[in-house]
Amino acid sequence: MKDYEIVIGLEVHVELATNSKIFCSCSAKFGGEQNEHVCPACCGMPGMLPVVNRRVVDLGMTAGMMLGCHINRTTTFDKKSYYYPDLPGSYQTTQWFAPVAVNGTVEIETSKGKKAIRIKQIHMEEDAGKLVHDDWTDTTLVDFNRTSVPLIEIVSQPDLSSAEEVVAYLERLRSLLRFAKVSECRMEQGSMRCDVNLSVRPVGQKEYGVRTEMKNMNSISAIERAIAYESARHIDAIENGTEELVQETRRWDDIKGKSFAMRNKETAGDYRYFPDPNVMPVVIDDAWFDTIRDSLPEFPEVKRVRYIEELGLGEYDADMLVESRAFCDAFEAAYAESGLAKESANWLITNCMNLLNRRQMTTDMLSINGKALGVLVKIVADGTVSHANGKKILEVMFDEDIDPKKYAEENGYIVSNDTGKIVEVVRAVIAADPKSVADYKSGKEKALMALFGKCMKELKGNCDPQLLRATILENL
Ligand code: ZN
Ligand code: MN
């Protein structure tokens, strides 16, 4: 068998984090009752004129800049005509002739080292609706909530040559777009969708092989499986003549572990692209361009190096933080307030993470006041509040924007340095529990813990554990 090379280009659709749809003021939020977020404009009524959502252009430019693209300062919308019941106007408004961003690069790293993947273009467009099949009545219903929800489509050049590279590329895109708050990029919710264009050719051959496009993968691992299956299918067809390869769109079935022909590949001509006369060209002036450029976040790997080299964090802590923009923002604010890098990172990675897990939230959903977190870090580190009580305060901070120090004072969480009070509590507990005292004196170490626990409870946790232990021992 010859050696084959796999050639992959990706089209990645990303739902933008906007409140409203791309050409009307309907909500763009996921969910809701069927056809709740619908108006005449987004369900294709004749005579309704679209108005471009400025925020969509902001995010399109942001994505373009994050991926090193050239921004087209005059960007226009076009009609892509096709018929499908989830597309009420029978055309999709997208960008064909002057997309918002072109010619970028994304650098990826795999076991084979670094590689630059070229981005052909990023265009803004509207999503289609959703068909819902009702088995009970054997009918198909259409839900237009998703119609006109804003998307960007990121089109790569065919520079990828393995599933590993595709995974690295997608993870890199997701990280950059989340960091820039362009999208949450959640594959399982469909806010990031990836179409894989794949062909194979013998190593050394210049011409590309027959290309197929695969859809319907809803996780990174499904994409890996789909690439492994599809490339093997192509090679088998070429080597053994098992089937004739045709250019087509295929649907990945992750349960069967196979791809199935869906429709013959349309060419651009089939879509009859032409400028949409209803949508004004968008002209991006210098002020707008500069505002977006100045708002770009520091890249995650730059942060990572800074956290390690300047703030002295360990690699593990730095890696954990740069997974999420929300964590980075909270960390930086907490550090600015407390001056304690390691402790601030710890509170986030351990305690905040625990709380998020318990509430089944992702790291991106953290919405804590970072400055207040810094105050908490400080008052626990200097012994004003015990660690256990600090955790209780943190939980309140998840729901309310409180001043942790004030809250600690008002709720009796300040560690007491009043040794008189500690001695008083210790003596009272000892007097009331002769059994534990006797047990301890007959050699049962555990009895000391019982006394310790009772004293700590009496003191509401506001006592230095070392001091308490020493005081109990003195009084026994
Ligand atoms: Zn609408
Ligand atoms: Mn598209």
Image (cartoon, grey):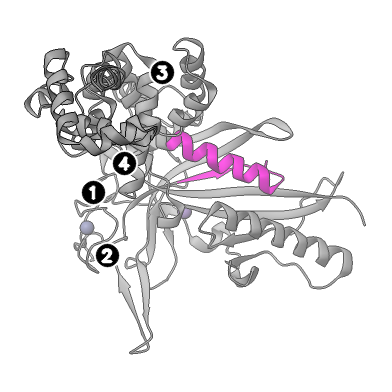
Could you say which disc has been placed on residue 44 in the image?
2
Check contact, mark 1 vs mark 3: CB within 8 A.
no
What is the residue that sits farthest to the left in this orientation?
A: 410
- The location of residue 99, given as percent across then percent down, is 45, 41
Q: Quadrant of residue 212?
A: bottom right
The C terminus sits in image quarter = top left
Q: Is residue 188 left or right of residue 51?
A: right
| Label 4 SS | helix
Q: Amino acid at mark 1?
A: Ser
Dot 2 crowding, Cα within 10 Å, few <14, some 14–19, many 20+? some
Q: Secondary structure at mark 2?
A: loop
**299 with respect to 375 (left or right):** right
Residues shaded magenta:
153-177
Q: Check whether the beta carbons of the residues at disc 1 and disc 2 lie within 8 A of each other.
A: no
Badge 4 or badge 1: first in the primary sequence:
1
Judge whether residue 88 is colored magenta.
no
What amino acid is labelled 2 in the image?
Gly
Residue nearest the observer in this picture, 453 or 103? 453
Residue on which disc 4 sits: 355
Q: In the displayed structure, would residue 33 be above or below residue 202? A: below
Mark 1, residue position? 20
Amino acid type, label 4: Leu
Residue 312 versus residue 143 in the image, above or below: above
**102 or 12: nearer the viewer:** 12
The mark lying in front, picked from 4 and 1, is 4
Residue located at (36% from left, 33% from top)? 442
State how far apart marks 1 and 3 are (Cα): 40 Å
User: Which residue in the structure is indicated by mark 3?
Assistant: 342
Q: Earlier in the sequence, mark 3 or mark 2?
A: 2
The secondary element bearing badge 1 is classed as loop
Task: Identify the residue at the far bottom of this view.
Answer: 137
